[in-house]
Image (cartoon, coloured by chain):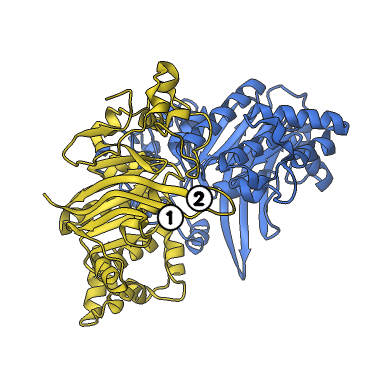
Amino acid sequence: MTAHERTTAPEGQAAPMLDVRDLRVSYRSGEQTVPAVRGVSFTLDRGQTLGIAGESGSGKSTMALSLLRLLPASAQVSGEVLFKGEDLLTAKWARLRAVRWSAASVVFQGAMSALNPVRTIGEQIREPILLHDKIGQRAARERAAELLDSVGVPSRRLESYPHEFSGGQRQRIMIAMALACRPDLIIADEPTTALDVMVQAQVLNLLGELVREAGIGVIMISHDLSVLSHMCERLAVMYAGRITEIGPSKQLIAEPRHPYTRALGRAFPTIGDPASRLAPAGLPGDPPTPSELARLSEGRGCAFAPRCSEAMDACRTDTVELWPSGPRREAACLRVLEGSGT
Amino acid sequence: MKPVLEVRDLTVTYPARRGAAPARAVDGVNLRVRQGEIVALVGESGCGKSTLARALVGLVKPTGGQVLSDGEPLGYSAAALKAYRRHTQLVLQDPGGALNPRQNVFDAVAEGPRLHGLTDRLDERVHTALAKAGLRPPEQFAGRFPHEMSGGQQQRVVIAGALALEPSVIVADEPVASLDASVRGEILKLILELRDSLGLSALVVSHDLGLAWNIADRVAVMYLGRIVETGTVEEVLLRPKHPYTRALLSVLPDSGEPPVLLTGEPPDPTSVPGGCRFHPRCPLRAAEQDPRCDGEDLPVLTGDPSASSLAACHLVQ
């Protein structure tokens, strides 16, 4: 089926809301082309939540931001991002601007830098509403007040400036803005990373409720596997620009099939678990550097092999891709193919 | 056993800014770290834990109370502080910021020894420190610059810089907060190894209760300038008494119990509530309606390390 046929397919039928196919992003850096995302595919429907886990440099944020073409011009993006049947990677800028905010919005990490410091938050929440929904100032004002109340910030504070709020409140305001035009998809990039545990729990709780009520599809990016597994039904783990394992969150945490998922899971101890008491678990070595990645992309072999305790000779020479590893799950590990990947 | 590091009734008050009241960042703390012991100090941002850590290494002069090192009160003359810092070293949060980008690893680690005039066999001292911090072989790392290393390696350089002075205590302020999950475990392992091989004591400041479970022997939970609960890690984290500790544990994703979401933001050290300082947010007080909660101040916890747990709460004695 081509992209064009999908465009004409009636909405709400078999085609998923978001269908990402072989997405690749590389950055030009001097003479070199450095791959950041090396072939990512997944689908997401309305009301579904997908968590993307990975460490810094895994390509998770680049991948998420490329969906709405929010990357700098030095990024080269290829593949397909079919959103309601329309390929956002080839869409005209005017069309893309219409999709941003109104159909798909982003909650960025670090609300302090994402909010404009010299404009009141009321103005900032109203801006996308006025731009996209063609309603009057007064109606926009009312909607902004409702939104602010719905995220637990008193609406009388609409005329306050970002610096007058705490970190947790600013992140709530970001969520209110993302919800302003009633989108079908929200991309949340580390929405709670800079927040304290208690505030993080409040914000996640809020996001979870709003998303469930409105049936919005969510892609949530985080380095924290335990947070993602509680927020999202499905989880994708990224390493070196690729998805290494994807499937239902609970299964991925309880029975990881990829050694990297296993290591990442152990890195977040469960309090009360005797196995982790006075025994922190890490993973020796470092993720591949950009130049190592560039080399990897040309040759074969598993990018994780140098750090993998279970690597075999074949891991360094064979092509590794996502293979089915159970119902609704896939893992990019040769051991899975062997049938011994437990 | 004599504590290697102790604070008694410590207070640190920052002067008022523009008409606001002074900030009582640390408002009465007793804490002891014994030989070979790892103590985790946990709390949310703004609770005073970093100020307490800085007071422990003499970077902040207390407004009241004392810091004692091997039982001796800390002096604040330049010479006394210099001598003290051979004994107690600080490891900071963000290794990228703590290292000078134009200084190679050798010079970064040698800085402390040079300041202290320990230049005899400096190479050997630096290489030993690098090896202890897990940068092996040390010759391979000595000439590198910070940007040539990963975050985990940078943090190892910072730790090596502390170890080069052969301290008996390390105060680490969020040593793994800026590191990736897989690297975090490796650095925590290193801190445990240093304790086992060198008998090093450590006070580790963190917002992460999982870190306490991973490496600490005892834990102190701080709220608005005071320690509200302290004791062995098992006792405090598995059988928490204080409603604040209970709430913090309940919001962890793996807690297995319904989360107790405290309302409001972490409170303000410029206006500490009277009575129990946690009472405006306390779920237990809301249920029990005890007049002592907002009417009667709580005594400062003694910080006695032999008690399995102590909690500053009117309702859970």
> Looking at the picture, does residue B281 appear above or below residue A37?
above
Residue A200 lies left or right of residue B245; in this view the side is right
Q: Give the secondary structure at mark 2.
A: loop
Residue A58 numbered tag: 2
Pointer 1 and pointer 2 on the same chain? yes
Per the model, the C-alpha gap separating discs 1 and 2 is 8 Å
> Looking at the picture, does residue B303 appear above or below residue B195?
above
**Residue A2 seen in this snapshot:** no
**Quadrant of the rendered image containing residue B131:** bottom left
Q: Residues within 10 Å of mark 1 (few under 14, many from 20)?
A: many
Q: Chain A is drawn in which colour?
A: blue
Q: Colour of chain B?
A: yellow
Counting every numbered tag in the picture gives: 2
Image coordinates for residue B122, horizontal then vertical, percent: 24, 79
The amino acid type of the residue labelled 1 equals Pro
Instruction: Check the residue under mark 2 and report the chain it is in.
Output: A
The residue most toward the left is B1
Pointer 1 residue: A287
